[in-house]
Amino acid sequence: AQKVTQAQTEISVVEKEDVTLDCVYETRDTTYYLFWYKQPPSGELVFLIRRNSFDEQNEISGRYSWNFQKSTSSFNFTITASQVVDSAVYFCALKHAGNMLTFGGGTRLMVKP
Amino acid sequence: DARVTQTPRHKVTEMGQEVTMRCQPILGHNTVFWYRQTMMQGLELLAYFRNRAPLDDSGMPKDRFSAEMPDATLATLKIQPSEPRDSAVYFCASGLSRDPRQETQYFGPGTRLLVL
């Protein structure tokens, strides 16, 4: 069975702090894809990144960076120098052979000024 | 800037009424997904279409829910009759499936449904 766990249900930081959102997944597939989505207060789900299971290179995009560790089945997301606009619920998701996305429960990030 | 569109954005209805939600996938995308989001269950897949054919609707209560794609630019999700427990945000997502596992799903803004 596939499962995605986001153990942090809520995180609160002060602007300019760095913050890491954890994601741990379970799958028996050898090929799979991992995603992060952002859900701001307006409610839409915004795609942030896709990573495949055979590419463990970390990725950086501006203030966002992702750390994929296959050995620990983790795909963590770090926001550097957080801003108020980063306040949202962030979802990690796994896509496997069945082509369906399995979502984690989400982490609510609150960035205070 | 291509986006998935959904209508209506908000719907309040009474128990027993029919509800129809519509989705326009991104032009050129050939897969469409319907998800439901609730506080208790999080994001759940309801149905999945590829090239307008339903591939998986195992997540959908069959007795009252139905999903169709009358054409490539329109997907519909109907609930008849609606019940208070159907209150949720319903998301449509679309993707371009060359390699299904690699495909990224792009989500619409959602329809917030409240059944009284």
Image: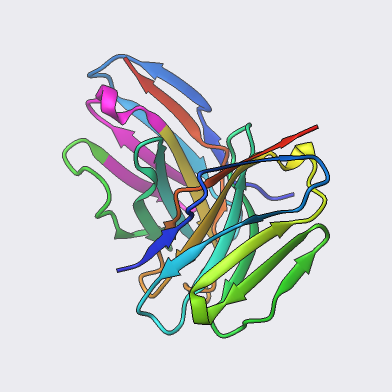
**B46 above or below A1?**
above
Identified at 35% across, 42% down, the residue is: B41
Identified at 55% across, 46% down, the residue is: A107
| Residue B82, visible in the rendered structure | yes
In the rendered structure, does residue A82 fall within the stretch colored magenta?
no
**A93 above or below A53?**
above
**In the figure, is residue A19 to the left or right of A25?**
right
For the image shown, how many numbered marks are present on the structure? Answer: 0
The x, y position of residue A83, in whole percent, is 80, 42
Q: Nearer the viewer, residue B52 or A12?
A: A12
**A37 above or below A32?**
above
**In the figure, is residue A6 to the left or right of A68?**
left
The part of the chain drawn in magenta is: B66-88
In the rendered image, which quarter contains the C terminus of chain B?
top left
Identified at 63% across, 32% down, the residue is: A42
**In the figure, is residue B21 to the left or right of B55?**
right
The x, y position of residue B87, in whole percent, is 35, 27
| Residue B103, visible in the rendered structure | no
In the rendered structure, does residue B72 fall within the stretch colored magenta?
yes
**In the figure, is residue B22 to the left or right of A35?**
left
* Residue positioned most to the left: B63
Identified at 81% across, 32% down, the residue is: A113
The x, y position of residue B106, in whole percent, is 58, 54
Q: Nearer the viewer, residue A87 or A29?
A: A87
Q: Nearer the viewer, residue A97 or B6?
A: A97
Indicate the quadrant where residue A43 lies.
top right
The x, y position of residue A79, in whole percent, is 74, 55
